Image: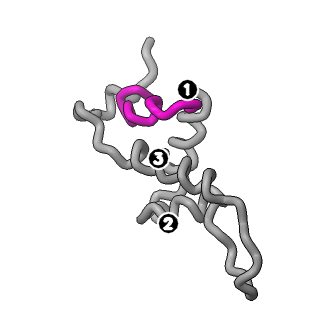
Amino acid sequence: MKRAAPALLEPFGVGPETAGQLLASAGDYPERIRSEAAFAHLAGVAPPPVSSGRTHRMRCLKRFVAREVYRALTSAPTTHITQTDLAPTA
């Protein structure tokens, strides 16, 4: 995981298990993660449309976290990954 997305372990609270789940989710839906807003929608933190202006949804913090994770997820790794790098060791 450190080779695939090293920046993904940098945000506070993102450990190996969370990072692995994020990579698996991103790998399952690469066409749906075309932008930060699309990632937020996939993560379930995009604000839902409301009919009245008086309704306020407390999703600002979750959206901030999704923004940070998206940046870490889409940052390019510093080294090139080959197929043999991802193969299990004997």
Asked if the magenta segment contains residue 6, the reply would be yes
**Marks 2 and 1, Cα distance to the nearest angstrom?**
24 Å
Disc number for residue 40: none
Residue at image mark 1 = 16
Q: Is residue 81 left or right of residue 47?
A: left
Residue occupying image coordinates x 46% and y 58%? 30
**In-front residue for pair 10/78:** 10
Residue occupying image coordinates x 45% and y 50%? 70
Q: Is residue 33 above or below residue 76?
A: below
**Marks 3 and 1, Cα distance to the nearest angstrom?**
16 Å
Looking at the image, is mark 3 or mark 2 earlier in the sequence?
2
Q: Which range is magenta? A: 1-16
Disc number for residue 68: 3
Scheme by which the image is coloured? one colour
In which quadrant of the rendered image does the C terminus lie?
A: top left
Residue at image mark 2 = 37
Expressed as whole percent of the image width and height from the top left, the position of residue 73 reads 42, 45
Q: Is residue 48 above or below residue 34?
A: below
> Which kind of residue does numbered mark 3 sit on?
Glu
Asked if the magenta segment contains residue 58, the reply would be no
